[in-house]
Amino acid sequence: MRKSFLNGLTPAQFLHRYWQKKPLLARASLLRFAPLITHRDLLDLARSPDAESRLIIRTGGRWQVTHGPFTRRDFAQLPARNWTLLVQGVNHVLPQAQALLAEFAFIPYARLDDLMVSYAPPGGGVGPHFDSYDVFLLQGAGRRRWRISSQRDLALVDGAPLKILRNFRASREWELAAGDLLYLPPRCAHDGVAIEDCITYSIGFRAPSAQDLCARFLEFLQDGLDTHGFYADPQLKPTCHPARIDRQLSRGLLRLLEGARWNRSDMLRFLGMDLSTPKPHVVYVPPHRPLSPPAFAKAIVRHGLRLALPSILLYDTTAFYINGECWTVPARARTRIRQLADRRELPPATVAAAALDTLHAWYRAGYVVTD
């Protein structure tokens, strides 16, 4: 397996030694991605309603959080220090960001959250905190000081608008410059503060909690419930204890509840749809004048095909899942569509008729593009 940008480790070596185990600092490992976006472009992006953005200001020991979209006036009124702008999902709007995320393609796309970019003047940060997921922190322009801790005390400041650690005790400290990359496993306490005007790229890998996953699964089951009948008790007898839930009532209602059943296939379908579901603010733009299927096929021959930037396409042994939808395709089409899912693009070539119907439907929905 090829050597990676992680201090010369192969992906397998990194996953075995560091993933979800301990931090890793890799100096000057992704230097070519440091100028991915300027702070002015990031400010412009934060003014768009299509972007998910937050502005965090620290005044002494107090924190203030404001959600975008923002205006030029909002930024003009900011102090010279101690604030941070965070913009989520930059990979949804910036094509160059996909090249950065492709460096991490040795980790399943189903785990990838998005690319968050932060800009901060001196003193800017979001306070000492911990994440419940894995994260790679790539330094762009400027310098940022990171302090980390393996502390078990994860108590938070009461009433703060952010999850700020109450008793942060740093055990290690680094200063990151352009191209430096810091990996942090889940629940590793950390605090990053800008030394000078700086940009930081955060590549997060989501890890749903059991509580959230089960809650979404039960919600998913509602759409597929097919139960019948009503509770009935034609042999009801008079009672002297009307507040009691007796055995006859319990047995009758339990029989109705037992009609809500699911199997492994239902759970796998839910997982594929859930893992490919985009965030609520994501919007797909269908083509204004969609090509006919024959013209679409010719366009693929000339230009190839790629996923729209916000699209998430996953698959398992039985189906494909794109943007929260489950699709079954003919066996002859699966290899080609798996290639699209793994590489996020198809080179210019003829597409088999078996795959064309599915791809054209995705094209009309704005999930894939050809140009």
Image (cartoon, rainbow, N blue to C red):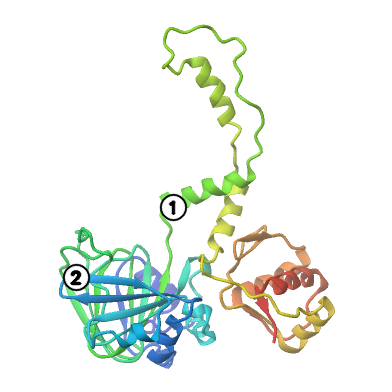
Q: Which residue sits at x=72%, y=60%?
A: 328
Quarter of the rendering occupied by the C terminus: bottom right
Q: Is residue 247 left or right of residue 185?
A: right
Residue 279 visible in the displayed image: yes
Please state which of residues 104 and 371 is positioned toward the viewer in this rendering: 371
Mark-to-mark CA distance, 2 and 1: 30 Å
Q: Position of residue 191 (x, y in %)?
A: 24, 74
Specify the amino acid type for callout 1: Asp
Q: Which residue is mark 2?
A: 62
For marks 2 and 1, the one nearer the N-term is 2
Please state which of residues 38 and 35 is positioned toward the viewer in this rendering: 38
Point out which mark residue 212 bears.
Answer: 1
Q: Which residue sits at x=64%, y=45%?
A: 224
Specify the amino acid type for callout 2: Arg
Answer with the quarter of the image where residue 278 lies: bottom right
Answer with the quarter of the image where residue 226 lies: top right
Q: Which residue sits at x=41%, y=86%?
A: 42
Q: Which residue sits at x=47%, y=52%?
A: 213
How many C-alpha atoms fall within 10 Å of the one at disc 1: few (<14), some, or many (≥20)? few
Q: Position of residue 137 (x, y in %)?
A: 35, 79
Q: Is residue 51 left or right of residue 324?
A: left
